[in-house]
Image: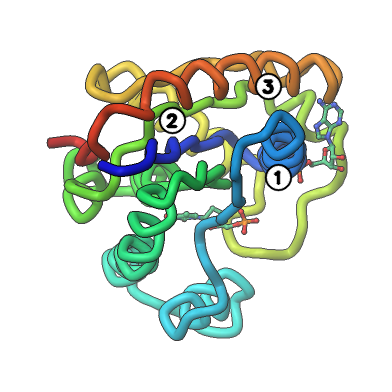
């Protein structure tokens, strides 16, 4: 490799845990300390597959549950060439939701196992760091009302949170860090920045890994 590669850094967590806020702050902070950094988010609603997903989330269309799971995964796979290109150029990617949301949300539906849900994402670029923003649903509810999109109910979010916890326990191959997201935005940011700087140094001379392989 001629240049040091960028790190793939993922933020996960339930609705209103602060993922988007923290992704934006992290990109800014990394840039200020001289790193190249860009944010991406999943689902990427701009592609053709992303538009099908967006219409489903906005309840403008219905899709069979297995089908929509595979579309969320396909929406990640279609971005892989671009993600790899950027990582190889030394750009750090800060990602708002990834395969872990895919598994936690679908497996919160009746009849879906973690294993089945993980399969389509096996082999994706492996994150160098996954930060799970842990927040009780009580505290999350004080950060605003649920929107009108599919999945935005307290019953479903509780099931999703349980699945995130189970996935984290079952997943020794991934570098998960649990972040206490109930603290102030600045405190959470400080911890995320330190962990990310470490992951960037550790990743720079390593090849990009393959998720769950
Ligand atoms: P997510 O992307 O996880 O759904 P957001 O970053 O959109 O969460 O944050 C949801 C809401 O909570 C926003 O209004 C945001 O300003 C607020 N928020 C985010 N982090 C914190 C925090 N640590 N303490 C209090 N409010 C927060
Ligand atoms: N979601 C997100 C899934 O169900 N599967 C996935 O693979 C991903 C990435 O889509 F309810 C769900 C999670 C959330 C919705 O909302 C996306 P935001 O507000 O764009 O993060």
Q: In the rendered image, which quarter contains the N terminus?
A: top left
Q: Residue at x 75, y 40 (%)?
A: 28
Q: Specify which label sits upstream in the sequence, 3 or 1.
A: 1
Which residue is outermost to the left? 213
Closer to us: mark 3 or mark 1?
Answer: 1
**Does mark 1's beta carbon lie closer than 8 Å to ligand 1?**
yes
Residue linked to disc 1: 20
* Cα–Cα span, label 3 and label 2: 13 Å
Quadrant for the C terminus, please.
Answer: top left
Disc 2 crowd, CA 10 A, few/some/many (<14, 14-19, 20+): many
- Residue 181 percent location from the top left of the image: 70, 21
Mark 3 vs 2: CB contact within 8 A: no
Q: Between tags 1 and 2, which lies in front?
A: 1
The residue that mark 2 highlights is: 164
Residue 130 vs residue 171, the one in the foreground: 130
Q: Which mark is drawn over residue 136?
A: 3
Give the left or right position of residue 144, taking residue 213 as reference.
right
- Beta carbon at label 2 within 8 Å of ligand 2: no
Comes first in the chain, label 3 or label 2: 3
Q: CA distance from mark 1 to mark 2?
A: 18 Å
């Amino acid at each position: 490799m001629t240049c040091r590669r960028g790190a793939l850094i993922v933020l996960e967590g339930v609705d209103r845990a602060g993922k988007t806020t923290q992704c934006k702050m992290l990109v800014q902070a990394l840039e200020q300390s001289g790193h190249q950094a860009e944010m991406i988010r999943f689902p990427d609603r701009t592609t053709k597959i992303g538009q099908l997903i967006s219409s489903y989330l906005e309840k403008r269309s219905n899709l069979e549950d297995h089908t929509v799971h595979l579309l969320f995964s396909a929406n990640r796979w279609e971005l892989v060439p671009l993600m790899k290109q950027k990582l190889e150029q030394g750009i750090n990617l800060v990602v708002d939701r990834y395969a872990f949301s895919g598994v936690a949300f679908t497996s919160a539906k009746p009849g879906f196992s973690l294993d089945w849900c993980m399969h389509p994402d096996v082999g994706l670029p492996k994150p160098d760091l996954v930060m799970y923003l842990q927040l009780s649903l009580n505290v999350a509810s004080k950060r605003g009302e649920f929107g009108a999109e599919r999945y935005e109910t307290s019953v479903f979010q509780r099931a999703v949170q349980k699945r995130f916890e189970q996935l984290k326990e079952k997943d020794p191959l991934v570098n998960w860090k649990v972040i206490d997201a109930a603290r102030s935005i600045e405190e959470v940011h400080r911890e995320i920045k330190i962990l990310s700087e470490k992951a960037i140094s550790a990743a720079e001379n390593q090849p990009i890994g393959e998720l769950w392989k």
